Amino acid sequence: MAKLDPSTIEDIFIRLGYPSDGTILLQTGYATDGLILLQRRLEEDYSQATIDRVSVIFDELDEIDEQKKEARQSSMAGSTSHTKLNWKLHLQHLNRDGHTLLEELARRVNLPIYWSKYPPAKRHTTQYQ
């Protein structure tokens, strides 16, 4: 068994959307020591496989962030000579993938997602025109 290093713990909090001031909103109200309690949970032992997977998740989230940045920069191009580009759908896929990775990260370290910067798309099966 191994432990997460302090920078990884901090990165987990950032990626799961926890505020840096340590005050989190709970069902019973605000808790200023909320992050301390959650940090204790992250200081427990984890398998090396879990620690390795957390690192891979970080890399994949970084890649999604870069793809979102590229999509935002190139969203002005609507189509090429043979291809029509759908940037909205592309961003929805990236957000879905990012949110799925956050869910996996949260499950692996046993913490809830506080806020996701990858909003999952609303589930509609029918599109009206």
Image (cartoon, rainbow, N blue to C red):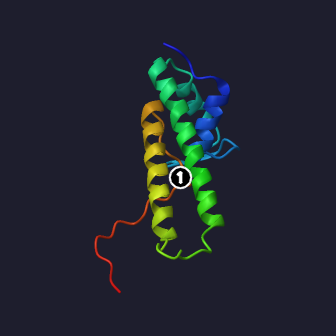
Residue 18: image quadrant is top right
Query: SS for tag 1?
Result: loop
**Viewer-closest of 81 and 46:** 81
Q: Position of residue 101 (x, y in %)?
A: 46, 44
Q: Is residue 34 visible?
A: no
**Viewer-closest of 29 and 117:** 117
Q: Position of residue 79 (x, y in %)?
A: 53, 76
**Looking at this rendering, what residue extends furthest in the bottom direction?**
129
Q: Is residue 17 above or below residue 11?
A: below
Q: Position of residue 87 (x, y in %)?
A: 51, 69
* Residue at numbered disc 1: 116
The residue positioned 55% from the left and 76% from the top of the image is 78
The residue positioned 69% from the left and 44% from the top of the image is 20
Q: Is residue 6 above or below residue 102?
A: above
Q: Is residue 102 above or below residue 77?
A: above
The residue positioned 52% from the left and 27% from the top of the image is 41
The residue positioned 48% from the left and 31% from the top of the image is 109
